[in-house]
Amino acid sequence: MSKKKGQSKVTVYPDWCKGCGLCAAFCPAKVLEIGADGKARAVREEDCVDCGFCELHCPDFAILVTPKDKSRRKDNHVVPAARE
Amino acid sequence: MAERTQLIHHYLRHNKKFPHVYCAGCGHGIALGSLIRSVHALGWSKDEVVMVAGIGCSGRMAVYVDFNTVHAVHGRALTIATGIKLSNPNLKVIVVMGDGDALSIGGNHFIHAARRNIGLSVLVLNNNIYGMTGGQCSSTTPLGATTTTTPFGQMEKSFDLVELAAAAGANYVARASAFHAQGMDKLMQATFTHRGFSLLEVVSPCHTQYGRKNKFKTVVDMYRWLKESATPLEQYRKLSAEKAKGRIPLGVFVDRDEPSLEERYADLRADQTAQAGRR
């Protein structure tokens, strides 16, 4: 977990977001906000400390926090063929 | 830390309608995410996991994940899971139930499955109410709470699920909360890998049916309440009775290592086969 600010990109999938406001209420750096359309959006992405709260606690799996630096990205979503 | 969401999307059945049916901010969604992360962390393949769910909001969970799934009848998820586990003990059987499903309608099955100590991983998503059917009081609705069937406040005492399971003889009993997702991941992995009947109660806020009638203005207020009232079990045991009132202890309550029913059954079968061979 990086302690430096602004190394992460916060993506919200608006189609999946139901606007419950959990991410906006508990984000320690106040990165997320509920917009006028009732959906969450990342307004202060440069303050993100990569704590991962929003991603772990989004009940609708609508938030993705990824490192901006592509080389640091994990390949979680591709499960090895042997395990399928 | 990051990049868990892609992982969750990998395990979902995308031909089902998404986003899921749960209301905005429902703790069941967080529990579903935790379940998928735990299965992935344990390195189980999709084919060796069987998920049995009952009826109710929690029952929808079996529809969304891409494991072998059974959407069972109301309260009878444990009976069907018992059959699956005994017929093929190599399968990892996960049972997901709500509080109404596990304790009210399937209460008898619950205590007897715990008594038999059969190797099931049981998740009870406790939201203190019958959410899907219109907010009737369940057997875990706290004393004095308002619901559609108790407009003047619940008059009956509620079940303590953890103590009930411990007294009935479960091997592993723990409680997690939807607000503490990382703790829930750890407890869930322990529940999935523990020998015998292992139970994890997940405190999951239901704002639509429970919160709105009980002075929680928004769903965020329910999570704030959970954040304030949740206490680790070690700390909870040190508190005086007065201070402990209204607090929710989280952690591992029972950790026994007794042989499970399917292990005993396998031993018995090996013995009998050996005896028959000698004759």
Image: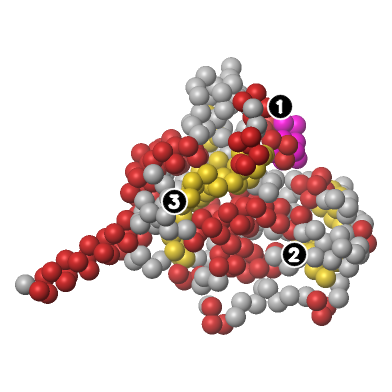
Q: Along the polypeptide, which appears first: circle 1 or circle 2?
A: 2
Q: Name the spot of residue B47 as percent of width and height, x first.
A: 47, 71
> Where is residue B137 shown, x and y percent of the image?
53, 29
Query: What is the crowding at mark 1: few (fewer than 14 residues within 10 Å), some, or many (at least 20)?
Result: few
Q: What is the number of the mark on residue B215?
A: 1
- Closer to the chain start, of discs 3 and 2, is 2
- Magenta span includes B130: no
Say which amino acid is labelled 3. Answer: Arg
**In the figure, A16 relative to A84: above or below?**
above
Q: Chain of mark 3?
A: B
Could you tell me how far apart the alpha carbons at marks 3 and 2 are, in whole angstroms?
32 Å
Q: Looking at the image, how many numbered discs can be counted on the residues? A: 3
The chief SS type of the magenta part is: helix
Question: In the image, B162: left or right of B116?
Answer: right
Whether marks 3 and 2 lie on the same chain: yes
Question: From where the camera sits, is residue B178 visible?
Answer: yes
Residue at 78 percent of width and 75 percent of height = A73
Instruction: Say if mark 3 contacts mark 2, CB within 8 Å.
Output: no
Mark 3 sits on what residue?
B256
SS category of the residue bearing label 2: loop
Q: Which residue is mark 2?
A: B1
The segment highlighted magenta reads B213-226
